[in-house]
Amino acid sequence: MKYSITILILLCCAFIMPAFGQGSLSSITGDETDLYAQTKQVNQFFRRFNNEEDRYGNRYYPGDSLYRDNAFRKVYLEMLFDKESPFIQKSQKEEFINHVADVDNPVFLDFHGDNWFAEVPATFMYYKKKETLLLFLQLEQENLGYKWVITNVYFDKFLKKFNKGDKELVKSKFLHPMSHELDFMNMYKVFQDPTYSEYYASKTFKPDYRTLLFYEVKMGNMEYQNLGPLKFHFFQVDGWYFEVNFFNRPGNNSGWLISKLYKISDKEKEDLIRFYLP
Amino acid sequence: MKTQFYFKSIIPRLFIILLVGGIAFSTGGCKSKKKLAQEAAAKEYADRVAKAIAELEAILNDDGTMPVVEMERRLNDIKSQNLNDTRVNELIKQVEAKIAAQKEALRQKQLDDQKKQEAAEEQTYHYIDEYFKQVANSKTVPEANAKIAEAMKMFSSPDVPVLIIISKAGSDVDYDKPTTIEKYLNYLKDTKNYNNSVYSVKMDGYGQIVSLELIKN
Amino acid sequence: MKTYKSLIILLFAGFALQGVAQDNLSPERKQAIDSLALEKVRDLSKYISLIGDKDTPFSEANRVIDRAVELFMEGSEVGVSSLYKEEINYYQVREYLERLMRLNYSKVDIEWYKIEYVSDLERQPDGTYVGVITIFQKFSGYDQEGGLVYQDVTKKDITVYVKRKETQIAGKLIGFWDVLLGDIRVKETTKE
């Protein structure tokens, strides 16, 4: 129950546009301070989080004196938070920074490590109506390298078809154990009310929304239109969850930044990850 | 006393007789041959010395027609005869000094030639570099095109391959994608970016470049 | 038969080792490749400036478009979004450059910020390295009277593909890095 609330919270924010710049620089002065400060790529988010580059973006290599330097990390980590986010408590942020930049047991982000996911809203024409669904993706190793793969689809239209029905009714949705003696003449019940059809399936049944998406697209019932703003979910720091969004705005707090930060239990982490990677 | 005197006087006399008789006995048979041989040897020696002196003097007086190697060969020939003649020894010293001096001069000349050649090559490379810079720094398109047409004359064809070394670490040489001189010159015109140097040049019998290797500065 | 099998296994092991070995490029070599990739992006920005420049003769601009297109992997696209319309509009690279050439301003200024951000090179399943270079451009359009009528700053995230290839040149085997640009994401950051 607790995890579904967490998911709900996360989902509520899923469709909120990232905070695009309110207004613009009144003049371009040629001052590039903001551009240097901006976390311009997700790649830079990783490098800054781990202190693997200098302030001009030149990368450090293992063996360089400042590579993953702890003191510098704390400065960078502080910069990597969206300062306008209502979802980040100052005390939690400090606790998080102290945790990941702990001298004895530092935590680094790993691009090739598991437990981080991309989420992007995608617009489709679904039976001639514009609909937005969420695509979840993860990096997967293959042969000599890596690729992004779709791990799950979240589409309320699909979900509604598999919603939890009336509990009392659900209880009566089964084919009794002697049905075979009657040549399963009661089979019609399974399909008579499709709302409950899946309850006649074995208990391991789990709807795979990716199959539905691909099927509908193949059938021509769904047509890809466009993408919305991208975000990332990170579970690489034990006991913590954070979300990263792109903030396209002037000032020195822009680019890819942590916009949400939560402390989570192992169980919550497991449940959340199952949502992105069923 | 008398006997004593006798003995005293007879022993040296005998000794002398023996001594003289011995000499007469041993040499008496070929006395004239020996002398001839001695004379011949003395003459031969004198000839050899004279020949050596003449040769050494010839070497010393040589105006540069005799190669140093030949001088050295002749000197070694004379030295191997161990003539042990004061004049010859003196001349040997002089010739040795001359040969050493000539060798040093030769070495210096070779060095100079090498330097000159290197400088000449460098100048050729520099010359190519200059052309590339001029194309890159042209203010107008017609100016750049004129420079390109001029530069193209150095190459055997517009398709001469141009290789650009981007890094060199031991045996690992990394290149940029090979291009042709025509494309490269136009690239310089468009990007105004010449940040390479000529690394190696291959020319054909007509002195036209058939392949060019550049290296990133 | 047995020899065959071991031969095949050996061959595969060879491939796998080669794959791993190639990934362990020294930082120096990586830097040389980064610089090469960066140079291609700088070349592109120079081409863009030339194409946009109203003083560039039509024939020259067309020739430069050809050269610019040669920098790209076939089928590469430019995805453009604006501050107020985040929906992405897609253009083929040539189409994008031709639109730039035909823009209806009397004078166009295209300036590039000094900042260039180069990502790591990551390998994709086929072994090709892929990276992203981010640059920023200021575009200004002027009317006949010389008045500024449009200005924006865009962030350009440019895909770079790097592949090790070999070729024979005059009987010599040359190992080179083939750097090709890919899709470009153009995001408006400020507008006037």
Image (spheres, coloured by chain):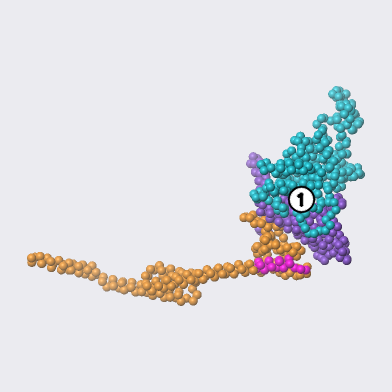
Chain colours: A cyan, B orange, C purple
At 18% from the left edge and 68% from the top edge, which residue is drawn? Answer: B16
As drawn, the residue found furthest toward the front would be A91
* A30 with respect to B44 (left or right): right
Residue B44 vertical position relative to residue A100 in the rendered view, above or below: below
Q: Judge whether A169 appears above or below A255 on screen.
A: above
Can residue A44 be seen in this snapshot? yes
Residue C71 spot, x, y in % from top left: 76, 57
Element carrying mark 1: loop
- Amino acid, disc 1: Thr
Check residue A94 for magenta coloring.
no
Q: Which residues are magenta?
A: B124-140
Mark 1 lies on residue: A39
Is residue B133 covered in magenta? yes
Q: Could you tell me residue A260's position as x and y percent?
A: 79, 43
Mark 1 Cα shell of 10 Å, populated few (<14), some (14-19), many (≥20): many
**Residue B115 on image: x %, y %:** 58, 68
Quadrant location of the N terminus of chain A in the rendered image = top right
Q: Quadrant of residue B51?
A: bottom left
User: Residue drawn 76% across and 41% down?
Assistant: A92
Q: How many marks?
A: 1
Q: Is residue A233 visible?
A: no
Q: Depth check: give the residue in front, B146 or A139.
A: A139
Give the quadrant of the C terminus of chain A.
top right
Relative horizontal placement of residue B188, taking residue A20 as reference (left or right):
left
Q: Position of residue A212 (x, y in %)?
A: 85, 39
Front one among C134 and B173: C134
C20 to the left or right of B85: right
Helix, strand or loop for the magenta stretch, by majority? helix
Residue at 71% x, 41% y is: A99
Return the chain for callout 1.
A
